Image: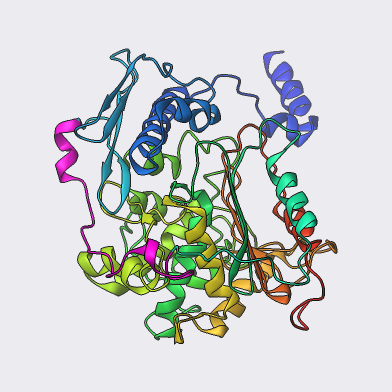
């Protein structure tokens, strides 16, 4: 009788839909301790950069930067946090079972998050960059190499009212969750519109978030142009965990092209509700190694066949760049020497983890004018002051839809975003950086335009950079060339 009941039960189980067997609901948040730690780490980084990298008031930081967090600790007048002005550092939390998280400003880099077991006494061991800046006072150097701009009338053919209306479209949002901090429009190399929210100005640095990825691919492109990196060669890493036999690792087939196209095939970590519990969040906000985390992902799909937006794909490309450059000092100075100093981006700091590895997937601090310069480099086909910095072939690569996106939106190239398939209200040649909380640098070659919008969006966000592009284009007439 017992055997009969067992057989009936097994048959009934076999007849259940596969989803009823395979999908088991879990309601308990097993990641909560790490989420709590990461939230404190986020607040430490946001407050540190707001105060010491951006030079903003603590009232402004609480009102805008920390609005992104579900439950920020304290208020502008105090709470369970410490701001150490002398060390330019912040500590968040109390001894309540969740680690106290600390972040400290470091010269030339911005704020670095410390590990949970580190204190302010460990700050001096964190990386920094003391490379002198090029000679000359930016305020006395003409735009775009400097910040000196002569008062001039708008060029003929530019509709001032339409340009102002586009600016109002960006700043006067119906959604309180979309907060525009700054906007710049560059036409024919000149700034024709520049606007800042109260409390902001042209020197205010804020985090680029994933706009940093477009800076990363520019630096990598310089090495590809020089023959020191190659798009279609395997990355050649010693993946983690290390192999216990001589058999090849299936990840050995991943190339630079795959990771720059967000098509590595590696397991998705930064999606599915775990963005602020594990994955790259551990290096962004909790002091873990950005390199080790990137090397530990398992292969889930054949490289090049699927598109999955992952911070770690970018960080793998940056790690390869580090290996090619060879030594720590050359690596640390490379963004400044080869890109930022060349085009006048003196307000830009490229952040690292506490081990000195660039977090060029998100952690760059800059202002709107520097991003306008960056967009101009691409608008000028990679040439600045008659010197070629990146090849036209590389620009073609970053603007070409990743193969895994073709027919499925086609909205992503090589660490740059493209006009989605089927969208016809903006020129098809436009392409854009894109960062969390609304960080966009849009390049429109057919109209000789660069549009920069910086934001501190929160909640559902959703600011449409192509909508802004459409509105700005209403102020301009016939395209400046045939590419549309």
In this picture, residue 123 sits left or right of residue 102: left
Up/down of 332 relative to 398, above or below: above
| Image quadrant where one finds the C terminus | bottom right
Colour scheme: rainbow
Q: How far across and down, in percent of the image, does residue 63 sit?
A: 52, 26
Q: How far across and down, in percent of the image, does residue 8 sit?
A: 76, 22
The magenta segment is 120-146
Most frequent secondary structure within the magenta stretch: loop
The tally of labels here is 0
**Any part of residue 203 in sight:** yes
Would residue 121 be counted in the magenta stretch? yes
| Image quadrant where one finds the N terminus | top right
Q: How far across and down, in percent of the image, does residue 457 sit?
A: 61, 38
User: Which residue is located at x 69 percent, y 20 percent?
Assistant: 6
User: Which residue is located at x 39 percent, y 71 percent?
Assistant: 339
Would residue 436 be counted in the magenta stretch? no
Up/down of 177 relative to 354, above or below: above
Up/down of 165 relative to 258, above or below: above
Is residue 361 or residue 272 the one in the foreground? 361
Task: Say which quarter of the image contains residue 331.
Answer: bottom left
Q: How far across and down, in percent of the image, does residue 196 sit?
A: 57, 45
Is residue 333 or residue 242 the one in the foreground? 333
Task: Say which quarter of the image contains residue 348.
Answer: bottom left
**Any part of residue 259 in sight:** no
Task: Say which quarter of the image contains residue 452.
Answer: bottom right
In this picture, residue 245 sits left or right of residue 27: left
């Amino acid at each position: 009788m017992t055997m009969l009941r067992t057989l009936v039960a097994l048959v009934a189980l076999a007849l259940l839909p596969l989803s009823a067997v395979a999908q088991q609901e879990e309601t308990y948040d097993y990641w909560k301790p790490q989420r709590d730690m990461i939230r404190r780490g986020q607040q430490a980084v946001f407050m540190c950069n707001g105060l010491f990298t951006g030079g903003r008031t603590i009232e402004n930081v609480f009102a805008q930067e920390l609005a992104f967090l579900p439950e920020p600790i304290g208020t502008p007048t105090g709470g369970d946090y410490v701001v150490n002005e002398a060390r330019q550092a912040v500590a968040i939390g109390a001894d309540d079972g969740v680690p106290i998280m600390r972040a400290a400003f470091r010269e030339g880099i911005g704020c670095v998050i410390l590990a949970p077991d580190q204190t302010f006494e460990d700050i001096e061991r964190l990386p920094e960059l003391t490379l002198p800046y090029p000679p000359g006072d930016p305020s006395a150097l003409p735009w775009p190499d400097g910040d000196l701009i002569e008062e001039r009338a708008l060029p003929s053919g530019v509709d001032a009212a339409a340009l102002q209306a586009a600016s109002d479209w960006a700043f006067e949002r119906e959604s309180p969750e979309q907060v525009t901090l700054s906007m710049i429009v560059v036409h024919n190399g000149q700034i024709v519109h520049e606007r800042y929210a109260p409390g902001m100005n042209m020197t205010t640095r804020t985090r680029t978030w994933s706009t940093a990825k477009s800076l990363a691919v520019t630096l990598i492109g310089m090495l590809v142009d020089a023959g020191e990196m190659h798009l279609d060669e395997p990355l050649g890493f010693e993946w983690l965990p290390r192999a216990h036999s001589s058999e090849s690792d299936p990840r050995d087939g991943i190339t630079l092209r795959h990771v720059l196209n967000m098509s590595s095939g590696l397991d998705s970590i930064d999606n599915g509700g775990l963005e602020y519990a594990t994955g790259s969040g551990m290096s962004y906000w909790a002091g873990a190694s950005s390199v080790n985390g990137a090397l530990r992902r398992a292969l889930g799909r054949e490289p090049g066949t699927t598109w999955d937006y992952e911070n770690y794909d970018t960080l793998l490309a940056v790690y390869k760049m580090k290996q090619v450059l060879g030594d720590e000092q050359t690596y640390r100075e490379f963004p400044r020497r080869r890109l930022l100093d060349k085009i006048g981006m003196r307000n830009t700091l490229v952040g690292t983890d506490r081990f000195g590895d660039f977090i060029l997937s998100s952690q760059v601090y800059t202002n709107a004018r520097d991003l306008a310069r960056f967009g101009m480099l691409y608008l000028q086909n990679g040439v600045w002051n008659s010197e070629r910095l990146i090849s036209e072939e590389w620009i073609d690569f970053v603007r070409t839809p990743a193969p895994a996106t073709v027919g499925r939106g086609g909205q992503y190239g090589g660490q740059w975003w493209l006009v989605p398939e089927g969208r016809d209200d903006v020129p098809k040649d436009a392409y854009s950086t894109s960062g969390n909380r609304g960080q966009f640098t849009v390049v429109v070659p057919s109209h000789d335009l660069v549009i920069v919008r910086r934001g501190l969006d929160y909640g559902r966000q959703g600011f449409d950079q192509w909508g802004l592009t459409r509105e700005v284009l209403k102020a301009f007439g016939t395209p400046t060339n045939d590419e549309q």
